[in-house]
Amino acid sequence: MTARMDGSFIDYVDFIDVAVEAFETAPRKLFEKMMRLILNKFHDQEIELQRLSLEMDDMHVLPVDDLDEFYDTVLDAVDNIKLFKKKLEAIEAKDPLFAELHDEADKLHSALVSYMDRMGQLEVRIMQEEQRSA
């Protein structure tokens, strides 16, 4: 997974290295701004995933064309978040913002898993509706 920062993209795992360097060498205000940017990005993604999950309750068709690609993409994102959280665990004691980012990454991880689960429930519900109609 990547985050857009100032017109370019940065891998979440690479972000940790940049954040630690900023924490150690940059002015505090710059470090805080950088951390708030990624915290807000994670929070936005979590809210969007929750919204999409709730919308599935009213759906009767799959919102994706290729389920295999969907599951592969979401599983890759889940793995990336796990790796990100693991790197954060090693540094979260250095600053409360790292701990806050770990908490937000945990929420995003849960939202991704929930989103994937809801898609599976929708898939089953659609198959059951098709069987009843046949």
Image (cartoon, rainbow, N blue to C red):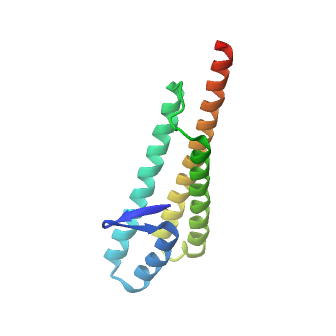
Left or right of residue 77: residue 28? left
Q: 53 above or below 7?
A: above
Tag count: 0
Counting from the top left corner in percent of width and height, residue 3 is at 42, 62
Q: Nearer the viewer, residue 43 or 5?
A: 5
Counting from the top left corner in percent of width and height, residue 57 is at 53, 28
The residue sitting at the top extreme is 133
Q: For the point 48% across and 38% down, which residue is it?
A: 52
Q: Nearer the viewer, residue 94 or 127?
A: 127
**Which image quarter: residue 120?**
top right
Left or right of residue 12: residue 72? right
Counting from the top left corner in percent of width and height, residue 115 is at 56, 42
Q: For the point 58% across and 72% down, which residue is it?
A: 87
Q: For the point 44% across and 53% down, which residue is it?
A: 43
Q: Nearer the viewer, residue 23 or 59?
A: 59
Q: Nearer the viewer, residue 60 or 12?
A: 60
User: Considering the image in quadrants, where does the C terminus appear?
Assistant: top right
**Which image quarter: residue 126?**
top right
Counting from the top left corner in percent of width and height, residue 64 is at 52, 38
Left or right of residue 47: residue 28? left
Q: 86 above or below 66?
A: below
Left or right of residue 89: residue 97? left
